[in-house]
Image (tube, coloured by chain):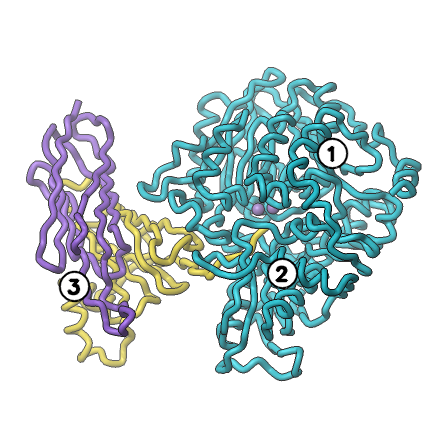
Chain colours: A purple, B cyan, C yellow
Amino acid sequence: MMTEVRPRIRLPRSASAGESIVVKTLINHDMESGQRRNSAGETIPRQIINRFTCEFNGVMVLDAALEPAISANPYMEFEAVVPESGEFVFTWYDDNGEVYTATETFEVS
Amino acid sequence: GNWSRLAAQQVLTQDDLLRFESFGNVSLIHVTDIHAQLKPIWFREPEFNFGVGDVRGVPPHVVGREFIDMFNLTPGSADAYALTYPDFVALGQAYGKMGGMDRVATVIKAIRAERPEAILLDGGDTWHGSMSSYLSRGQDMVNVMNALGVEAMTSHWEWTLGTDRVLELVDQLNFPFLGQNIFDAEWNEPSEDFPSYTWFERGGAKVAVIGQAFPYTPIANPGWMFPEFSFGIRDERMQEMVNEVKAQGADLVVVLSHNGFDVDRKMASRVQGIDVILTGHTHDALPEPVLVGTTLLIASGSHGKFVTRLDLDVRDGQLMGFRHKLIPIFADVITPDAEMAAVIDAERAPYAAQMEEVIGHTDSLLYRRGNFAGTWDNLICDAVMSERDTEIALSPGVRWGASLMPGDAITREDIHAVTTMTYGQVYRSEMTGETIHAILEDVADNLFNTDPYYQQGGDMVRLGGLGYAIDITKPIGERITGLTLLRTGEALDPAQTYTVGGWASVNEGTEGPMIWDVVEEHIRKLGRVSAEPNGSVIVSGI
Amino acid sequence: GLGASAVAMLPVAAAATPVDDAIAAYTGGAAIAEGGVTITAPEIAENGNTVPITIEAPGAVEIMLIATGNPTPNVGKFTFGPGSGAPMIATRMRLGRTQDVLAIAKMEDGSFASTAVEVKVTIGGCGG
Ligand SMILES: [Mn+2]
Ligand SMILES: [Mn+2]
């Protein structure tokens, strides 16, 4: 994917220690399924985000294995426990070997 | 004309139509699905309105003589004329046209004179349906509804003006544009542009009005025109909203809905705590509320033909009782409100000359509404096949569109009233018999799926050049049989390719002339038109 | 990954459908209890290319999502780590046609539970 990959994250404004919060992520990506053909009739090679992970302070929250049936611009919404203030690390793994990461600090009250 | 005005005034008076003994402490006034009809029109109610599954034979799936009997109407009476199809042409002579927003204004002012705190609510499909609303991109209706003093609305066809225009017009409204089910498509969150509900403190009661936009707007209409938004039924969230307003002290919970009647009936059975659902979208006019548990379902018709007044006794957070009247707007009986008439004239003025140009005449009744083809649709399909040189025509089964009486002139405005939309291009394409069959099955399932949550509230797609049989009780894929090319009498060959013309495609980039121009050209050539029910659809399972 | 193991199953289960294969590849043939998983998805998809779905499965450590009517049924496998706040995932998927969407939850004790919902993919048009 040649266009710039730009992850976006949505977290609640605040939470108290130990609370479970809703985390939303989006990343712009075609998720080329490998099943489409171009105008010349050739199969367009598959290129998808095949794995997504979210960790908070080094603790795994979600580890997702993704298939071509996941829509373009993959959206993931899930819940994470925040026992203390710290850092979220989000990682997307591309078929082409590239790895995209985003980090977000989160303060508990 | 004058004769019908005199005749109608002999049997009806404005006082009779408005007579209502005030009741309780809260009044709701409901209008819906006006489809931008500012002037009085003819509108024939459906001859076919089949219910499937649990709703077979129950309102609103009752028509004609059965309807008259069920609601104790007198055949040939003004009410029977307004609410049913039999003898429509003859009764139209006696009772005249219906609707007109200046007449609607008179009725609303009269109710407010008696009940200054009455709440006026508009169920949507307001900014679409006429030539002037098309040309002004909804501006005429926004100005008229502001002048009318509407206090909240919800939406459906409004969205076919596209996101930018909707936001621009919403900004001009003196009232909220509600929709608890309008979501930001990107983040899957309730849109911040449109409130879920609004509050009224009236008659000593706290009234919450929750909006519900048409759930299938991005499917039934071109979703690419408003890609930022997602809709859907979202009855779990509706329950949350009901709980939320009750927690905030609502004495009365009203849902201003554009779900369609059967969807609302199901929602009323799943969401607890709604007192009143003001229904819309399916264009049903019912002289009495339908009760689901303790929830009242109100159906106020379409095209400005009716205004509902609902008086409620609300005490200590409880609905104790109600009094209801579906007020028919007989245009020859109700005096137009002068102020509103002036607003309407001003809105129409820039377009009046184009709109009022006579294109031809009709010798037969032209109507659309009904599950299967109306005569207007037959004429439109003929126009598409003849002007676009196709073997088959497809015309959408929308429920809007006024009627014309035998002998009437057909103006450009009349053609727009049955065709106008922001995606009216008439395509010409090639389809296999198999594809055509699949389209018919798909649309039939939107109408006859036994689970209302899978219904989209339109009527069956209209066909030109093709006949078929349908068993409405069968599942998808098995309803349509006997597809026959009428020109040759031969069965439609699944493998063969046919030329097909149609309009209202939801696909972006559809090319072709606009449907109203195609119909105008056809009518102009004929001069006088006549269209009969085509008899090429055989319905079973009813 | 999961795709590879599904393909590896094919020769031994030649008569089975791709959906059966996908399920068997995931559960190893173990029994699956009905229910215990809540799926929220639209009755009718607004756009078959991006159909929102939310799956909740109390007590689950992992959820497998299968589109039974797609040529390649697997959609995704979602494993909840120790930092997870709830066994819940919402995502968007491609559905080629009207079909049942199946979610299989793997529970803490290694057992499986599943629920399916029908999502209609329609050509659209028309309305009141
Ligand atoms: Mn509608
Ligand atoms: Mn309507």
Instruction: Tell me: B456 left or right of A85.
Output: right
Q: Residue shown at 56%/38% (left/top)? A: B138
> In which image quadrant can residue C96 be found?
bottom left
Q: What x and y, as percent, mark residue B393?
A: 60, 68
Q: What x and y, as percent, mark residue C26?
A: 20, 64
- Label 3: how many Cα within 10 Å (few below 14, some 14–19, many 20+): some
User: Which numbered disc, 1 or 2, marks the residue that appears first in the sequence?
Assistant: 1
Residue type at mark 3? Answer: Leu
Label 3's element?
Answer: helix
Instruction: Tell me: B350 left or right of B450.
Output: right
Task: Decide: is B394 above or below B183.
Answer: below
Q: Nearer the viewer, mark 2 or mark 3?
A: 2
How far is the residue under mark 2 from the one under mark 3?
A: 55 Å
Q: Chain of mark 1?
A: B
Q: Residue shown at 47%/45% (left/top)? A: B233
Q: What x and y, as percent, mark residue B266?
A: 54, 47
How far is the residue under mark 1 from the one under mark 3?
A: 63 Å
- Label 1: how many Cα within 10 Å (few below 14, some 14–19, many 20+): many
The dot on residue B518 is: 2
Residue type at mark 2? Answer: Val
Residue type at mark 1? Answer: Lys
Q: What quarter of the picture does the C terminus of chain B occupy? A: bottom right
Circle count = 3
According to the picture, the residue beneath numbered tag 1 turns out to be B325
Q: Chain of mark 2?
A: B
Q: Residue shown at 20%/31% (left/top)? A: A19
Label 1's element?
Answer: strand
According to the picture, the residue beneath numbered tag 3 turns out to be C2
Whether residue B450 is visible here, answered yes or no, is no
